[in-house]
Image (tube, rainbow, N blue to C red):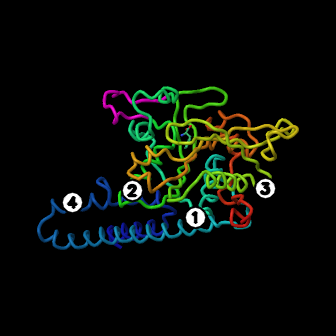
Amino acid sequence: MTDLDQLKTDALTRIENAPDAAALEALRIEFLGKQGSISGLMKTLGGMSPEERQVQGPLLNGLRTETADAIAARKEVLENTELEARLAGESIDLTLPAPEVPRGSVHPVSQVMDEIAEIFADLGFAVATGPEIEDDWHNFTALNMSETHPARAEMDTFYFPDRDAEDHRMLLRTHTSPVQIRTMKAASANGGEPVRIIAPGRVYRSDSDATHTPMFHQVEGLAIDRDIHLGHLKWTLETFFKALFERDDIVLRLRPSYFPFTEPSVEFDVGYSNEGGRRVVGGHGDAEGHDWMELGGSGMVNPRVLEFAGFDPNEWQGFAFGLGIDRLTMLKYGMNDLRAFFDGDGRWLSHYGFSPFDQPTLSGGVGARA
Ligand code: PHE
């Protein structure tokens, strides 16, 4: 056997037996690396006579190619074995319990907003939305609150810095009532058509104590048609509260009030009783152990507002109401601290939150009572 044959047999055997990728790489460097034995032999070709080189050249080239091929083949075998071993070791036991994944929950306010939308959908009201960053005109002027109207001062408005822009200076809406204007303007653009909407959403006032947060939630209601009167308003609110609180003994009290955008204006209260420190809605507010709780404001849409929004007040009229969703939520689900609503405390949320997969649905909705 020549030295070359010996080297080849030796190389191929060791490659064939390399136990793992690291050992194989060490062999590649030993034979084919810059300082490798086969590379060294290749270098000797330069010093040979042409005749010698003609013989040795093909032999050495063949040796180099065969060695490289053997390494590649061994590499593939090793990789396959490694993969198979890993797959065998990684088999999944489907009978094992899965680790628990933390799950989000539906915030009680979102839950009640959904319930409100569901009830009013039964009554034929669509959901409308408007921007939370509003302009002066939609939030005040078109609602019959001129620049100098005292009601503006009571609203504790957050204004944006540019206060000079008159009707177009921007603010955080102080109520959901500007959605009335936006909806009516859209409906009056083509000559006027009946409107039935609710507008739930966030509103902002510069106010903060145990019962007030600078951001809170309201839902606006608006019905415009040719023959709407206060009786429709009362029936709608009563029907709504009965469905929301899931009880038939809801008693509503309307009290004369004042809002620039409604005429006449009424505030509405519900009767409730105190049961073990908890307010429970139901019953007549003047009955033994009962009292009244104010829930919101409402009234017939002021003709001036209809005009601002492009409706002819001689032909159209309507009612509007606005109520606080946060208070409603506290009442319905027996919570007592408003500020906890917006603390973002995961423990509070997992206690009071609702599962997105297991929504408590209202028993039958409005239709079932009709
Ligand atoms: N926007 C009034 C408020 O925030 C509530 C209201 C709405 C009153 C619609 C009458 C009609 O206090």
Residue 157 location (% of width, % of height)? 47, 29
Estimate the spatial distance between the alpha carbons at disc 3 and disc 2, rounded to whole Å: 37 Å
* The residue stretch that appears in magenta: 157-171
Estimate the spatial distance between the alpha carbons at disc 4 and disc 1, rounded to whole Å: 45 Å
Q: Residue furthest left?
A: 50
Q: Could you tell which of marks 4 and 1 lies nearer the N-terminus?
A: 4
As drawn, the label of residue 188 is 2
Say if the magenta span includes residue 168. yes
Q: Quadrant of the C terminus?
A: bottom right
Q: Which residue is mark 4?
A: 44
Q: Could you tell which of marks 1 and 3 lies nearer the N-terminus?
A: 1
Estimate the spatial distance between the alpha carbons at disc 4 and disc 3, rounded to whole Å: 105 Å
Tell me if the residue at label 3 has its CB under 8 Å from ligand 1.
no
Kind of residue indicated by mark 4: Thr
Disc 4 crowd rating (10 Å Cα; few below 14, some 14-19, many 20+) is: few
Q: Nearer the viewer, mark 4 or mark 1?
A: 1
Kind of residue indicated by mark 2: Ser
Estimate the spatial distance between the alpha carbons at disc 2 and disc 4, rounded to whole Å: 97 Å
Q: Which residue is mark 1?
A: 86
Residue at 61% x, 58% y: name it: 120
Q: Nearer the viewer, mark 4 or mark 3?
A: 3
Q: Secondary structure at mark 3?
A: loop
Residue 42 location (% of width, % of height)? 23, 62
Estimate the spatial distance between the alpha carbons at disc 2 and disc 1, rounded to whole Å: 70 Å
Q: Nearer the viewer, residue 212 or 13?
A: 212
Kind of residue indicated by mark 3: Asp
Whether residue 198 sits left or right of residue 244 in the image: it is: left
Image quadrant of ligand 1 equals: top right
